[in-house]
Every structure is written in C-alpha cells, then in structure tokens.
C-alpha cells in the first residue's frame, strides 16, 4: 500500500471531479503506463478502482471520478467529503488494459471511460502514432478534459447517441489498425457489434469494463463444486451462497481481493484442471476460451465437479 495526500480537486465537466494525489513522503509515485488503474481505499470503508489519467511521466497521480446517481458510497464520498490535504491509502498501479504497439489507433470513449483513453491520447501524440479519438457524452458540458482534448485535432467530442454515430465513426477493419474502447457495458457491446459487422478481428479490439457484467440466466447456477489447491491437495466445497474467494479465506488461504465484482483482475488465478464458469468482465472471450485459463476467484464458478487452481 502507498500513502498519499490529496494535492488538489477540481471539476472536469459538470459531472466529474479530478483528484491529484502525491506521495506523503514527497517522493515520486511508482511509474505507470496508460491503461493502468489503482485501488483507492476511502475513509468511508469503500475500496474503488480508478484509472490513472493525464501524463504518465508525472511524479503524481491523477484520477477522475464521475458522480454516480446510484453510488454505493465511493463516488458520493469523493464528490461530497474528500478534501485537499486528506491522506489516503492506495495500491500500486496494475495494468490490465495496456496500450500496445500499433500502426494506427482508434480510441472510443463514453462517459467517464475517457480517463484511460485521455492518457493513451497523450502518449500516442508524444510518440507520433496516428490516432483518432471519439468521445461520446450526453451533454457537451459533461465532457471531462474537454479543453485539453480540443487542442488535439485527432479528438472529437460527440453528443449524438453512439448507437447511431458508431456506424459512421468505426471504419472497416484494416491491417495495423487497433481500437481501445472504454465506457458503460452497453456502449462497449454496441461497439463490438458494429466492429464485427465491419470485419474487425477480436484481437484488434481492446476494452475495459467499469461495471460488472450482468449475469446471464444459468441453469447450473445452484450447483456445488469443489476447489482444490494444486500446492497442497487441500479441497473444500464451494456452496451456492459463497464465492471461491470466501471459501479459501475461511480456510486460511490468502486471496488478493480488490473490487470483488470481477472487473479489476486482482484475484485472477491460473487453473490447473477443471472447466471454469467465467463470470468476470476483465478477461476477453479469447482469454476465457484459451488453453491456459485463469479464474476470477471473487465471482466465477465451475462447470466441472472440481476446479484445481495454482495456489
């Protein structure tokens, strides 16, 4: 854990609040790359994941928090209670949404999904990589980092519904063209639908979820299975009302948890044997069907009677 101080707070549009964090000891905070996020432990007891944004060469961290009408505590606390000078505990950065090398880049953001993509735009601009950013908001006044984005000729802010605009903004698939997508689940689903119709390969689409996926109806959702540790051979049943992580913790196994919703990747653990019932939003469909799989201990279950994990 890192101890930081809130160095500044300011409005970004009419729905978001930017927060600058500096190390309490005055040193530079650990380096990061666009797409990284941190866990923020708020004094209200909530732990929330926020993407780092702005220039990744800065010694401080910048996050941007949208005001959620249905806040579970984190957004409300940041907007109503957090003050400059306040101390917070945060994790070191983790990156499950990295910006890979590409000949040309398309960035598609909706709402607060602009935070990681703004950092990507800055890095692409500095590297001279051709890119275009389309940023969708309901009202222009709600756009975060609007002043900075307007300085880039490659960035366009749209108030038109992405459901109709995406058909115009998402080109036919081309070799060397990759897209990074961030926003609400419905937005990213629409992007993938349009991209598939235009011949995009899944490997050229990179996305990050800010909300857990809505669980689909499952006929086997009530089945009990056994989790087994590959290192010791210990086995425990996982009942329908508990997660794998909860069962492991009850039996003295240390489990790295953060969001507990399947969106941050902190508890992803390699699977040695068994068939995973994937319920996380952090892994791609290709990763979920790969030969070497990982299971999100906080939310996923097992289609097989036993799941052997690399712990």
Image (spheres, helix red, strand yellow):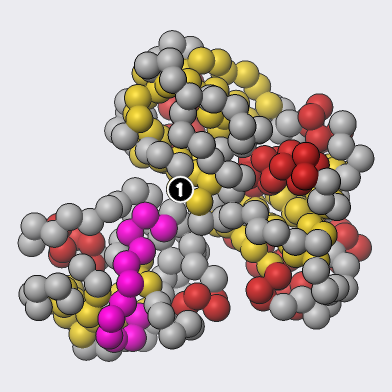
Q: How crowded is mark 1: few (under 14 residues within 10 Å), some or many (20 or more)?
A: some
Task: Determine if the magenta segment contains residue 60.
Answer: no
Estimate the x, y position of residue 146 in percent, counting from the top left.
79, 31
User: Which residue is at a point 48% across and 82% down the rendered structure image?
Assistant: 290
Q: Which residue lies furthest to the top in this view?
A: 85
Estimate the x, y position of residue 34 in percent, counting from the top left.
61, 45
Image: 306 above or below 253? below
Image: 63 above or below 291? above
Residue, disc 1: 94
Mark 1: secondary structure: strand
Answer left or right for 209 relative to 170: left
Estimate the x, y position of residue 291 in percent, counting from the top left.
43, 85
Among the 4 quarters of the image, the one containing residue 144 = top right
Q: Evaluate whether residue 165 shows in this view.
A: yes
Estimate the x, y position of residue 228 in percent, counting from the top left.
16, 77
Among the 4 quarters of the image, the one containing residue 38 = top left
Answer left or right for 235 relative to 22: left
Q: Evaluate whether residue 17 shows in this view.
A: no
User: Which residue is at a point 56% across and 32% down the rendered structure image?
Assistant: 63
Answer left or right for 309 relative to 35: left
Image: 232 above or below 119? below
Q: In which quarter of the image is the C terminus?
A: bottom left
Q: Which range is magenta?
A: 265-276
Answer left or right for 306 relative to 107: left
Camera-nearest residue between 116 and 55: 55
Among the 4 quarters of the image, the one containing residue 205 = bottom right
């Amino acid at each position: 854990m890192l101890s930081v101080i809130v160095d500044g707070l300011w409005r970004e549009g009419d729905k978001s609040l930017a927060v600058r964090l500096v190390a309490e000891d005055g040193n530079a905070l650990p380096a990061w790359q666009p797409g990284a996020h941190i866990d923020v432990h708020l004094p209200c007891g909530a732990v929330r994941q926020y993407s780092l944004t702005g220039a990744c060469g800065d010694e401080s961290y910048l996050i941007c928090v949208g005001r959620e009408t249905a806040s579970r505590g984190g957004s409300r606390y940041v907007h109503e209670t957090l003050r400059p000078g306040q101390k917070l505990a945060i994790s070191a950065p983790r990156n499950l949404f990295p910006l890979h090398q590409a000949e040309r880049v398309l960035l598609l953001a909706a709402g607060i999904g602009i935070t990681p993509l703004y950092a990507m735009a800055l890095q692409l601009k500095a590297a001279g990589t051709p890119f275009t950013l389309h940023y969708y908001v309901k009202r222009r006044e709600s756009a975060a980092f609007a002043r900075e984005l307007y300085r880039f000729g490659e960035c366009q802010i749209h108030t038109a519904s992405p459901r109709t605009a995406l058909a115009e903004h998402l080109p036919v698939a081309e070799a060397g063209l990759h897209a990074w997508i961030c926003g609400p689940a419905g937005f990213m689903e629409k992007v993938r639908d349009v991209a598939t119709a235009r011949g995009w390969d899944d490997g050229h689409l990179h996305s990050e979820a800010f909300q857990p996926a809505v669980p689909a109806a499952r006929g086997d959702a009530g089945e009990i299975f056994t989790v087994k540790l590959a290192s010791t051979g210990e086995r425990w049943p996982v009942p329908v009302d508990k997660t794998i992580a909860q069962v492991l913790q009850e039996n003295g196994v240390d489990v790295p948890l953060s969001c507990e919703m399947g969106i941050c990747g902190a508890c992803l653990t390699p699977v040695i044997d068994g068939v995973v019932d994937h319920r996380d939003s952090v892994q791609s469909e290709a990763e979920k069907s790969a030969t070497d799989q990982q299971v999100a201990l906080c939310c996923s279950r097992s289609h097989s009677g036993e799941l052997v994990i690399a712990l």
